[in-house]
Image: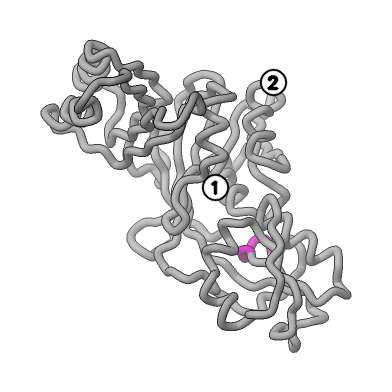
């Protein structure tokens, strides 16, 4: 039976690009929201979900983090970094009149990534938020007689037969999004892929209450073992003001000594520690600003 992969749809999203890169030969199933993707894994409709978790410009995708940590206890099985190039997409009817576009549709993060362009080139256009860049492109394609545009990628332009009125309208060149691959249980994704870049382990740590210097002690447990942390982020526990847990990415695969030693030390400090996953990482960037897979 072919493996089914959930991704944030419809067709033409950056999430589809990520899913296609990791699972080129499997069945990719679009869902209308990030929680729907995760629910699809939990209820067995699909085996994996690919969802965005962090953007280099806009930061973490809190919806993904919070739904993963509070609602769906899925394991991170992998991650992939995708370069993000945003374009202004319009119906062919307005190719010569795009400066008079009245509304621009896209995902909130995509619109935020193009803030400078929109303010300078389309200052009077109303901004409309959609669940994804693909959904925005689909909407524009279905309303050919309206003076509207979408922000999306080349894949969306091709999928919905839209024109690229202006390309590369994002504010920053080094715009990348990190996607995580989720599953109910641990699986082994191939680390022989040409996209493979290394491994990570992600931990969730809850500090003990009323413990002065607790965060310092947590970081020290990694530091004296010379473990590199690529990210540490606090998220509210949703139990009251001032209550947080920390999501920590360690730049190495789970081993038999170092990371278990960290966990034991933190638990001795009365911290609660959960393993969110130890997994391979992939990237569509061979080196800075060079894409190795056509998107």
Q: Identify the residue at horizontal 66%, vertical 31% (top origin).
A: 4
Q: Where is residue 39 shown, x and y percent of the image?
A: 67, 27
Along the polypeptide, which appears first: circle 1 or circle 2? Answer: 1
The reply, left or right, for residue 128 in relation to residue 172 is right
Tell whether position 185 is magenta: no
* Residue to which mark 2 is pinned: 43
Task: Please determine whether, in this image, residue 124 is positioned above or below residue 264.
Answer: below
Q: Which mark is residue 229?
A: none
Q: Where is residue 285 shown, x and y percent of the image?
A: 40, 56
Q: Where is residue 149 shown, x and y percent of the image?
A: 72, 71
Circle 2 packing at 10 Å, graded few (<14), some (14-19), many (20+), is few
Mark nearest the camera among 1 and 2 is: 2
Task: Please determine whether, in this image, residue 137 is positioned above or below residue 34.
Answer: below
Q: Is residue 287 visible?
A: yes
- Residues at discs 1 and 2 in contact (Cβ within 8 Å): no
Most common SS among magenta residues: helix
Q: Identify the residue at horizontal 45%, vertical 31% (top origin).
A: 241
Quadrant containing the N terminus is: top right
Q: Identify the residue at horizontal 38%, vertical 36% (top origin).
A: 234
Separation of disc 1 and disc 2 at Cα?
A: 22 Å
The reply, left or right, for residue 7 in relation to residue 93 is left
Q: Nearer the viewer, residue 130 or 235?
A: 235
Q: Where is residue 77 shown, x and y percent of the image?
A: 47, 29
Report helix, strand or loop for mark 1.
helix
Task: Please determine whether, in this image, residue 88 is positioned above or below residue 184.
Answer: below
- Quarter of the image for residue 216 reads top left
Q: Identify the residue at horizontal 64%, vertical 66% (top origin).
A: 151
* Residue to which mark 1 is pinned: 18
Quadrant containing the C terminus is: bottom right
Task: Please determine whether, in this image, residue 50 is positioned above or below residue 202.
Answer: below
Range drawn in magenta: 152-156
Report helix, strand or loop for mark 2.
loop
């Amino acid at each position: 039976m072919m493996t089914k992969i959930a991704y944030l749809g419809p067709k033409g999203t950056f999430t589809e690009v990520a899913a296609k890169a990791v699972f080129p030969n499997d069945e990719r199933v679009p869902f209308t929201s990030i929680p729907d993707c995760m629910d699809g894994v939990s209820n067995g409709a699909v085996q994996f979900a690919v969802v965005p978790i962090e953007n280099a410009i806009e930061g973490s995708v809190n919806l993904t983090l919070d739904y993963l940590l509070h609602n769906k206890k899925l394991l991170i099985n992998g991650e992939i970094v995708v370069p993000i190039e945003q374009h202004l997409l319009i119906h062919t009817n307005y190719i010569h009149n795009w400066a008079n576009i009245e509304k621009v549709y896209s995902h909130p993060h995509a619109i935020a990534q193009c803030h400078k362009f929109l303010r300078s080139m389309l200052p009077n256009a109303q901004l409309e938020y959609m669940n994804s860049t693909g959904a925005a492109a689909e909407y524009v394609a279905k309303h050919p007689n309206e003076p509207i545009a979408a922000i999306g990628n080349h894949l969306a332009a091709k999928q919905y037969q839209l024109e690229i009125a202006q390309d590369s309208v994002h504010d920053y060149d080094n715009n990348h999004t990190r996607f995580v691959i989720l599953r109910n249980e641990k699986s082994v994704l191939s680390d022989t892929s040409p996209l493979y870049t290394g491994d990570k382990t992600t931990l969730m740590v809850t500090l003990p209450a009323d413990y002065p210097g607790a965060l310092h002690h947590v970081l020290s447990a990694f530091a004296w073992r010379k473990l590199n942390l690529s990210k540490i982020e606090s998220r509210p526990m949703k139990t009251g003001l001032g209550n947080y847990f920390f999501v920590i990415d360690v730049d190495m695969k789970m081993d038999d000594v170092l990371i278990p030693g960290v966990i034991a030390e933190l638990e001795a400090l009365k911290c609660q520690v959960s393993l969110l996953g130890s997994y391979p990482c992939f990237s569509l960037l061979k080196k800075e600003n060079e894409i190795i897979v056509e998107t």
